Image (cartoon, rainbow, N blue to C red):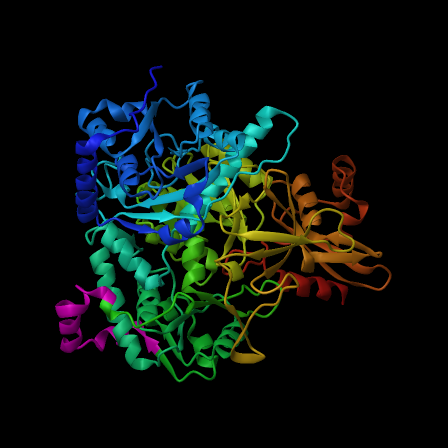
């Protein structure tokens, strides 16, 4: 391989050309460099071995970095195919020294190490090639090995904007001749790799650390903004004619049409409420729901998402906790869902606003305001807001206690949307089918806002329970992403044709544990790996998830970028500890019935900013998280702590095709007695005892009582309703 780089002496003519190129590029691309002052103040440019790592968006990356990077005479490691073009090679000769290489060549690493050891600063693109997805691609381990081998200081730099230029590989994305380009210089760091049993393992570990570092880079470069501001950014980037969202009305909205809806709803609801007021929204998965969400938020109100599948007591508790005075719903929905009696029983509301009446209240003045000003200057409409302000109020599912209002800020929701997008590679190319209710954080943030703000096409369906219809919808719309719970996914695989999910590339499971049977059935029937994740409403919601780049069956994946964690040991539990997390996606606080309207910041023994999940987890050496159980889902049997999760795993091993849930009831002789609820009428204690002996389950995990049910009770979010099961277990004892 012929390896060469241009000499350090450029000459006066070349120097003048470089200045001219810098002026032209700054004017045409409106290049903005962030973090330069911090970089210079830290003295990073004085390091003798400085390795700059950057994401790779286009063929212009090296040129833009060469012109604006505040690093003295760096050498750029570029793909050899890029310098084949005479014009590109000429410009690169002017702006920087470079070393053309072929990724994977055995001599590349040695040459880069020699450059660093000679005192030259080096710029490298760990992805090797230009992105094809708009996000991070495969990270080459050799880049990390160079950093570890030389002990070089790493300077992370993130480029934004060039993926939408005519020099990117995103041919089917909207392109601009002169996109707005931002360079973000992040704090320098070093790669520290622990001693491993062999060099190959250490080499792999260094690559994993670099991959996580680049994911952290992708998150750290995000600007602080509001939900409505992020939507405006998406529309500016992908264009107003982009078809972005649709529902069962068979009407698909463009960004322009969706923006119209948002502005009108926001203006109309603004007349009926006060700034900062929590406005209740009781609607199914339809585009109007999203229109209210963004519209209310843009006008300084806080949408509170009410669960229509809850009982009167649950809805009343939510309204009381959030001090909801105005409730928005639809007459057609109230009639179809038979909610009239529930609404009539609610107390404390000042008004119930129906969507049909609200639309009739639109005046000529409203349309003049919309078409003459607001639609063309949408950013000017938004009231002044901070990313730390409340964006939405969601309510915990009530699977173990009375629902609490969870206040999520703009910062928390947008951070989690970006964290999830980075892990799952969701982009404009995707078509997402969301059947999960948006009153639940999994359905709102992960299944709706994450793809929507990434420019993907989202189709909203009102119920996840239509097991025959949903696979057909996925087939007709050629959907690429589907999200669901174990229960829902288990039923889809039963009723779907093997070709219904032919276009799916990503299936995400959350809200409840994914059973081995469902995982295997999906792989056998459709050839699809389910990406199991884990989270909580309080974390907006995702904490961990498996991804195409890091997948391990039987786990809930690795922590999202930007999340710190600590484990606290708990007496009686041998493996793992109670999980505490901290990150940009943590909630602002709770709204509780016992202190209505007052934000209660969650307390954790780890200190300020930490949230205690209440789940016991174990983290393996590769960073994959194993859920051991929930603190509240342990029973004390004969003085020993027994995980109800273990009881369910035991039943699942005996009856893979059935659905099982464990609960407990008080018992005078043993403290508590285990009760197993199952849809398999054939399961018995003898079979459970035999499986426990073979698989190593403790004898105490064998339930004393087995109850057959036609179906397990579910909450609207798809989770098992353990409150109902607990009551059923206690009634058995009575």
The residue segment tinted magenta is 353-379
Q: Is residue 267 left or right of residue 189?
A: left
Residue 242: x %, y % from top left: 22, 50
Q: Is residue 87 above or below residue 304?
A: above
Q: Residue furthest right?
A: 669
Residue 444 visible in the shown view: no
Q: What count of labels does the image hold?
A: 0
Q: Is residue 4 left or right of residue 507?
A: left
Residue 53: x %, y % from top left: 41, 38
Residue 493: x %, y % from top left: 48, 41
Residue 362's image quarter? bottom left
| Residue pictured at 30% horizontal, 35% vertical | 62
- Between 538 and 504, the one nearer to me in the picture: 538
- Between 605 and 465, the one nearer to me in the picture: 605
Residue 540 visible in the shown view: yes
Q: Is residue 484 left or right of residue 199?
A: left
């Amino acid at each position: 391989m012929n390896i060469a780089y241009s000499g350090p002496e450029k000459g006066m003519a070349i120097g003048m050309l470089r200045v001219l190129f810098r002026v032209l590029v700054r004017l045409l691309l409106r290049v903005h460099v962030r973090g330069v002052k911090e970089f210079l103040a830290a003295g990073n440019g004085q390091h003798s071995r400085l390795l700059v790592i950057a994401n790779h968006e286009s063929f212009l990356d090296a040129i833009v970095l060469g012109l604006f990077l505040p690093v003295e005479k760096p050498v750029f490691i570029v793909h050899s195919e890029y310098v084949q073009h005479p014009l590109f090679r000429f410009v690169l000769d002017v702006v920087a020294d470079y070393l053309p290489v072929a990724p994977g060549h055995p001599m590349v690493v040695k040459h880069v190490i020699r450059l660093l050891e000679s005192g030259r600063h080096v710029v490298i693109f760990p992805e090797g090639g230009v992105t094809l997805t708009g996000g991070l691609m495969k990270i080459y381990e050799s880049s990390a090995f160079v950093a570890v081998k030389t002990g070089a200081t790493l300077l992370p730099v993130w480029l934004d904007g060039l993926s939408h230029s005519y020099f990117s590989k995103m041919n089917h994305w909207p392109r601009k001749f002169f996109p707005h380009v931002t360079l973000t210089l992040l704090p320098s760091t070093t790669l520290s790799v622990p001693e491993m049993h062999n060099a190959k393992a250490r080499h792999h570990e260094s690559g994993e650390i670099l991959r996580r570092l680049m994911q952290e880079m992708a998150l750290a470069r995000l600007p602080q903004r509001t939900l409505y501001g992020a939507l405006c950014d998406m529309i500016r980037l992908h264009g107003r004619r982009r078809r972005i969202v649709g529902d069962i009305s068979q009407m698909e909205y463009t960004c322009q049409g969706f923006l119209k809806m948002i502005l009108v709803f926001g203006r109309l609801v603004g007349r009926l409420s006060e700034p900062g007021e929590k406005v209740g929204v009781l609607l199914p998965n339809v585009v109007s729901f999203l229109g209210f969400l963004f519209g209310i938020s843009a006008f300084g109100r806080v949408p509170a998402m009410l669960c229509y599948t809850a009982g009167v007591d649950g809805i009343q508790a939510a309204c009381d906790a959030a001090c909801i005075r105005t409730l928005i719903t639809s007459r057609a929905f109230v009639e179809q869902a038979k909610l009239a009696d529930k609404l009539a029983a609610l107390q404390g509301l000042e008004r119930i606003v129906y969507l049909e009446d609200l639309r009739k209240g639109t005046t000529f003045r409203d349309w003049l305001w919309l078409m003459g000003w607001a639609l063309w200057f949408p950013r000017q409409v938004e009231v002044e807001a901070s990313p730390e302000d409340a964006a939405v109020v969601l309510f915990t599912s009530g699977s173990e206690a009375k629902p609490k209002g969870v206040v999520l800020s703009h910062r928390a929701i947008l951070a989690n949307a970006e964290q999830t997008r980075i892990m799952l590679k969701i982009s404009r190319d995707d078509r997402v089918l969301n059947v999960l209710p948006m009153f639940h954080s999994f359905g709102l943030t992960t299944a709706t806002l994450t793809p929507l703000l990434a420019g993907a096409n989202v189709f909203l369906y009102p119920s996840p329970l239509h097991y025959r219809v949903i696979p057909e919808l996925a087939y007709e719309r050629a959907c690429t992403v589907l999200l669901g719970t174990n229960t829902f996914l288990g039923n889809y695989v039963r009723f779907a044709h093997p070709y219904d999910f032919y276009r799916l590339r990503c299936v995400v499971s959350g809200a409840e544990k994914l059973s081995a049977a469902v995982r295997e059935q999906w792989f056998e029937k459709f050839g699809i790996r389910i990406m199991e994740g884990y989270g909580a409403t309080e974390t907006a919601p995702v904490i961990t998830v498996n991804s195409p780049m890091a997948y391990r069956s039987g786990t809930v994946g690795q922590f999202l970028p930007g999340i710190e964690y600590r484990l606290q040991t708990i007496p009686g539990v041998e493996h793992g500890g109670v999980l505490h997390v901290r990150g940009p996606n943590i909630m602002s606080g709770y709204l509780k019935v016992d202190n209505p309207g007052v934000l209660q910041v969650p307390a954790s023994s780890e200190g300020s900013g930490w949230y205690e999940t209440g789940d016991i987890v174990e983290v393996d050496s590769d960073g994959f998280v194993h859920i051991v159980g929930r603190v509240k889902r342990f029973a004390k049997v004969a003085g020993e702590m027994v995980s109800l999760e273990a009881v369910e795993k035991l039943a699942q091993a005996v009856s893979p095709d059935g659905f099982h849930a464990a609960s407990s009831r008080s018992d005078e002789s043993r403290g508590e007695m285990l009760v197993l609820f199952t849809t398999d009428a054939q399961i018995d204690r003898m079979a459970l005892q035999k499986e426990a002996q073979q698989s190593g389950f403790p004898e105490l995990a064998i339930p004393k009582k087995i109850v057959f049910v036609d179906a397990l009770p579910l909450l609207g979010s798809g989770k098992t309703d353990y409150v109902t099961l607990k009551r059923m277990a206690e009634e058995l004892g009575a």
